[in-house]
Amino acid sequence: MKKLFYSITIISLALLTACGSGKQQASDKKIFTADEIKSQSALANKFFDSVFDADVSRDPMRQSYLGIKKDYDKWTDISDEHAQKELEFVKADLDLLHKNFQMDALNDVTKISYRLLEKQCVQTIDNFKWRFHNYPVNQMDGPHSAIPAFLINIHTVANKKEAEDYIARLSGINALFDQLLVNLKIREAKNIIPPKFVFPYVLSDCKNIIAGEPFEKGKPANALLEDITKKVNDLKEVDDKTKKELIEKAKQAMLTSVKPAYEKLMAYWNELEKKATTDDGAWKMPDGDAFYDAALKQTTTTNMTADEIHELGLKEVARIHEEMKAIMKKVNFKKDNLNDFFDFMLTDKQFYYANTAEGKEAYRVKAVKIIDDMKQQLPKLFNTLPKATIEVKAVEAFREKSAGGAFYEEPALDGSRPGRYYINLYDMTNQATYQMEALAYHEGIPGHHMQIAIAQELTDMPKFRKNGGNTAYVEGWALYSERVPKEIGFYQDPYSDFGRLAMELFRAARLVVDTGIHRKKWTREMALKYFKDNTPDPEGDNLKEIERYIVWPSQATGYKIGMNKILELRENAKKKLGDKFDIREFHDVVLTSGPLPMDVLEEMVNSWVAKKI
């Protein structure tokens, strides 16, 4: 799972069926010369980058994610007033796009960029009405947990000024949380309130953030204090007196800004919990069915209905079960029932590291080796490789109890921060060793890290295409990447191959459960039973997944739908090209145009095939 704090909803970029502003009659249609097309395309690409740069210039946190330190002492404005202003910028961008550029005056690559930016703007405008249909504070994400993670992992400190910027951000948390409280109260008035299960998670995270020094005298240092202390003490060109002064200022900012911010949030949260119910689906929100339809369209970049997605999930679950039964026979499992095999895989101690510091570190080290081994084989699969490096990190203690099982964080554009594969080692019984390979391939190489780093490093694409994304493409590629290593000889251990299938099965079951919860009004108990009956995953994993689907409607459906489309395009290309098919060239087509909606990706692959025939 690719994790981005600053974006609650990932905007998908679907292809318009009719684009451009040229409306001349066919007989009056202007014919542009090659020089005119070259010139207009260059101007259009400058415009695309100006739009992206302007957007980033108004978003301090996104700047930091990208390694830009322009507004390094500020937080992104999350007020609805700011959102309204941003909408006007989007409308103005769309208007300028239509007024200044004609599709016929652009080269093929720039035409696609035009269409993608146009659709992005149109979707932002059309979906603005749904901006409150989410839970900005939940067990998966939100300022309460993401702000500390941001400061620790994103805000680097290379000099005194950047340390002061860190402290300024600490001092600004109280005002940021005031905006957050306003947003939560707007949702409360609309009766958009998280389900009851969310509340204890959030309260636990909040309490963890304001535990320890300087909030509790005599206790071990708080995660934030530990972080800023280390970063300041590592500065080589700052004297000891100045370091102590900086650390003291950080402590004061925590006491005067961080502590009251969290106390106010917790006080409101305790009151809001009294209004919460156990209803889980998006259907309970105002116009919930229409919102969920729009969310599915964004996530999958298709027009598939909830019922169609549900049925696809059922079919894929049945297919994967048959492949699992073959593995069950291969390892000479003595019983015939697949659920008995699931129980064996779930409970046998051979598949789990010890739930100790040593066991957790052993898991992390093994994950590093899996990725390193895969790196050596990449030339068999790819012509284009990323320059950015990747590291494996355990999820921090302050958020590991509520965080997901694993996720990826993109590198900084300037190379100052590597890509990061985070693995949640809070409870080792939820991290089976037979899934280690597939999980590392998904989050690391050749999955998220390959796709995102290559996109960031493209030199002939507008910035918005290099740094955007939609779930079907981003997660579809990562799920596809779990399968690709098998095709070159990995997963030699049949249990690891079972783990690969188990993870694909989980994504297929998501299609059933997500639509079950949000369209068919399934309860958490019904969803848990479906997972228990059809997957080999621990109940703890299943519960976390279900709770994730509840607070992120539709997001989990993009994985399997995206993977299926990539496989479909690949197999169609193989049939048409025969011996001319080269998997490395196919992967170049998929990865070297930036993230694309599924129909545009199909167009790109078909064009590549046509040129090779």
Image: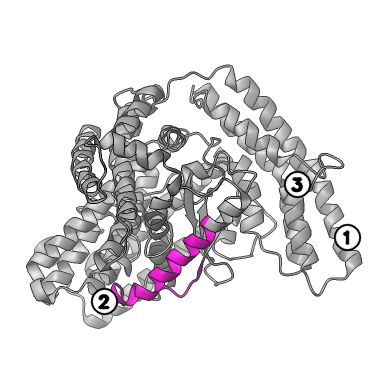
- Residue type marked 2: Ile
Distance, label 2 to label 3, CA atoms, is 58 Å
* Residue 30 on image: x %, y %: 18, 70
- Asked whether residue 268 is drawn in magenta, I would say no
Q: Residues within 10 Å of mark 1 (few under 14, many from 20)?
A: some
Q: Element at badge 3?
A: loop
Residue tagged 2: 37
Write down the region rendered in magenta.
363-390
Residue shown at the point (50%, 71%) measured from the top left:
389
Residue 582 higher or lower than 185, as above or below:
below
Predominant secondary structure in magenta?
Answer: helix
Q: Do labels 1 and 3 touch, CB within 8 Å?
A: no
Q: Do labels 2 and 3 touch, CB within 8 Å?
A: no
Q: Does 161 sit left or right of 447 as displayed?
A: right
Q: Residues within 10 Å of mark 2 (few under 14, many from 20)?
A: some
Image quarter of residue 448? bottom left
Distance, label 2 to label 1, CA atoms, is 60 Å
Distance, label 1 to label 3, CA atoms, is 17 Å
Residue shown at the point (34%, 33%) measured from the top left:
531
Residue tagged 1: 244
Residue shown at the point (60%, 33%) measured from the top left:
202
Q: Count up the numbered dots.
A: 3
- Residue type marked 1: Lys
Task: Give the foreground label among 2 and 1.
Answer: 1
* Residue 153 on image: x %, y %: 62, 57
Q: Nearer the viewer, residue 293 or 107?
A: 293
Mark number, residue 222: 3
Q: Element at badge 1?
A: helix
